[in-house]
Amino acid sequence: MTSQAYPRHMLVLIHGQLSAAGEDHLSQVPLAIPQDVNFLVLKTDLSGLNGRRAYVSIDWEAETVVQQILAVLQSCKARQQPISEISFFGFNMGGLIARYAVGVLFQMKVFSEIKPRNFDAFGTPHVGLVTPRNRVQQWLIRRVFPRFMEQMAWMDEWEESGRPVLDVMSDTNSVFFRGLALFESIRVYANATGDGMVPYMSAAIEKSDPFVDYKHSGIIVETYDEASRYPALIKSWTFSSSPPNALHPVLGFFLKTLLRRTSIYVLVLALIAVLIITGGKIATCILSVLGAFALYLAVITLIPAILSFMSIRSQNNRLDAQRRRLLDMSSVFPTSDELAEDGSRLVPSRTPETSKSSVPTTAPSTTSKTASHLTPLQLHAITNLNTLPQLHKELVWRPGCFTPHRALLGLGTFGKPSFERGGILRHWGDGLLY
């Protein structure tokens, strides 16, 4: 790349929800860009607090990002330094916000003047989270939590379409999908195991999880050497021809269920033992004390939190009703005239899936856990997204890591930069198109 007096390539960084991190959890991203590359880095700040404020909704935040992008583009053009290429980096929900923003920019014909190059998402829940079946959870999501939680659970109705916003964004005929398809490179980075914030199947856009129960499934994962530039990045994985002996069902239940709730079960068993030994008097006293303590915690934490969330949601709903959208809702899906003008045709949505993983695999169908807990709409979204020919998936292997989600950004447990965890960002930087 020849040197230029000013950068012509804009890199848009969009953060996620990681309030426990340091002042800026995207601080390591610009440092991973090769030194001889001249990017104009736009680090969007949706809240003024580097991601410490809960998002309103995917569409709300995305249009805020679009406004910031348009402002920078206009400013550069006014200085006779126009931008000719654009790339996106989204972390966590930032990847979904970026996908929506791409659809808005596509509809506004921005990509007719600016070339889309890289679209990269780190730990992004591309198909949301598991839709709760519990009525209490559904009520909390619909009435208490911010609207983005409703969108993540596929319980929302996006505008007049009546469809979840993630369903619309994954429709092959929508502006969101068509805009995303223009990027020369699309990469998603996902933790193969241990990520409690974003499940593997949502981050990797997969219908099955071959890494589930990896300790007993016989899976063999090969990663880059610790001395390489990309430690923890998976090179390939396969299943052993002679997997370890399956655990006894009772022992397996104990290991998978009881040990995950050790403190609760120990407490219950201890109370039962005390109840039997003392005839119930001491146990009754202990239960009374614990009940009073639980009630106290609910009063000082849970109830104020619910009231606060309800107030925020009500305020956000009022603001949402008053705002003027950048996206033309009537043109989310193309008309026949638009298709004729573009020389394209309607693409059948939910076409057969093709494999886009860049990781060599050898996996019998019987060893992978299917996504039975995902809804049919989520499975269709996975199918659609996997039809993107330029989609590549990079998987990260950090079993036993306490904070694998944060480690994707090269951050340690307490949000501080960690060189040992920076290999994934180095891989991203080395693969940038510029």
Image (cartoon, rainbow, N blue to C red):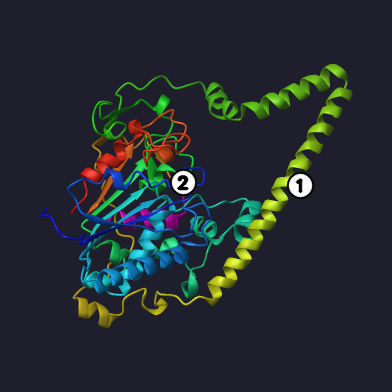
Nearer the observer: mark 2 or 1; the answer is 2
Q: In the displayed structure, would residue 280 be above or below residue 175?
A: above
- What residue is shown at x 55% (from left), y 61% (from top)? 147
Q: How many labels does the image show?
A: 2
The residue at the far top in this view is 277
Query: Is 215 in front, or is 108?
Result: 108
Q: Determine which residue is flagged by label 2.
A: 23
In the rendered structure, which amino acid carries the disc numbered 2?
Glu
Query: Helix, strand, or loop for circle 1?
Result: helix
The circle on residue 136 is none
Where residue 407 sits in the image (x, y, percent)?
A: 40, 37
- Whether residue 208 appears in this view of the structure is yes
Q: Determine which residue is flagged by label 1.
A: 299
- What residue is shown at x 83% (from left), y 16% (from top)? 277
Residue 248 placement, left or right of 104: right
Residue 71 placement, left or right of 274: left
Query: Helix, strand, or loop for circle 2?
Result: loop
Which one is earlier in the sequence, the residue at label 2 or at label 1? Answer: 2
Residues shaded magenta:
373-388
Where residue 431 sits in the image (x, y, percent)?
A: 21, 46
